[in-house]
Amino acid sequence: KKTVAVSSKPSSFVVRISILWSVGWSIPTRKPTQLKRFKQVTSTQWMYVSVILMVQSLNTKAIVTLASVMRRPYLASPHLAVGTVSEVNYTALRDEAGIRAVIFDKDNTLSAPYETVVHPKADQGLRNAMEVFGPSNVAILSNSAGTKDDPGYEDAKKIEEAMGIAVIRHDEKKPGGLKEVMDHFDDVDDASQLCMVGDRLLTDIVFGNLHGMLTVHCLPLCSGEENKKDNKIASSIRTTENLVLYSNWWGGNAIRKKTIPHAVWKGESQCSLVLPVDILAKDPSQSGDAGASS
């Protein structure tokens, strides 16, 4: 029987408390010299980040969950960080980590923002995932296509036709939507058998970690002119998320050290989930800054 964590709909009181908590929170800045590019983060700046997160497509689930992330910031720390989805060893995911299905975010993970064609840097990764798990066990979970923001699911249908994998329909945006995900995959009995791959820490990675999935964070595929269609609010938040977690300062280091362990996979040092460099070098289009694995 599938294991699904079901939570009741939050009351308006809980929503208000979550908003107040998120607005009032800030990162200590007693050691600004350690923050490098991140520099000083003031409560006013974090209030701005929190507020724009609230208004982005009215993602109420993210607003409520943000309070939990403030208390447990390691929820946003992925098990693995790579440059692109093509750097992941999907065979190792299946054989060594107990993964039965893979969920991808779409924009800046598989494609350029709001495009239906797979990006060249992600093409090999998607093909590898489909070959290892089968097309029926690979799907997209987007906070735009397949949601109520997608009238008649027209965008979802176009993506499915272009990429050859399903776009999961879901009413609640990430980090919500677990029930729809579990219902979609017939071969998955528990959320720990799922791998969530995406470029957003506060949605994709938090969603996966909240439910015990194996989480893989990738850098955004596009920049500059290629990224012109990206949602400016989402882009700003993503940049801040990455600076907080990956910059070499005491706060980010502390968060990464507390990454939630996966039920099966014991860590990159014991079993690598990243393809060897010599394999990646065979296709120059797949090269990218791999970030830092947890």
Image: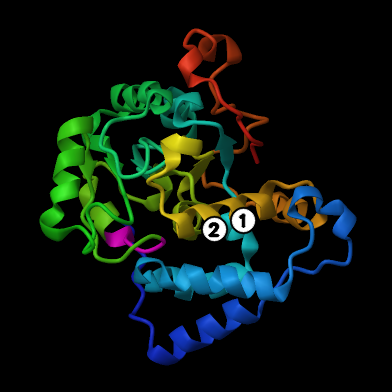
Tag 1 secondary structure: helix
Where residue 150 sits in the image (x, y, percent)? 20, 57
Q: Is residue 217 magenta?
A: no
Name the chief secondary structure element in magenta. Answer: loop
The amino acid type of the residue labelled 2 equals Ile
Using residue 37 as the reference point, say whether residue 266 is left or right of it: left
Q: What residue type is labelled 1?
A: Thr
Q: Label 1: which residue?
A: 240
How far across and down, in percent of the image, does residue 65 sit? 48, 71
Label 2 – label 1 distance at C-alpha: 5 Å
Q: Identify the residue at image location x=49%, y=31%.
A: 84
Q: Is residue 115 above or below residue 32?
A: above
Q: Which of the 4 image quarters holds residue 112? A: top left
The answer to whether the residues at label 2 and label 1 have Cβ atoms under 8 Å apart is: yes
Q: In this view, does 214 lie above or below 182?
A: above
| Above or below, 69 relative to 19 | above
Closer-to-camera residue (154/254): 154
- Res 170 seen here: yes
Neighbor class of circle 1 (other Cα within 10 Å; few <14, some 14-19, many 20+) is some
Q: Which residue is drawn at the image coordinates 48% and 68% (left, top)? A: 53
In the image, which disc is placed on residue 237?
Answer: 2
Q: Give the range drawn in magenta.
A: 175-179
Residue 260 appearing in the image: no
| Residue depicted at x 50% and y 40% | 220
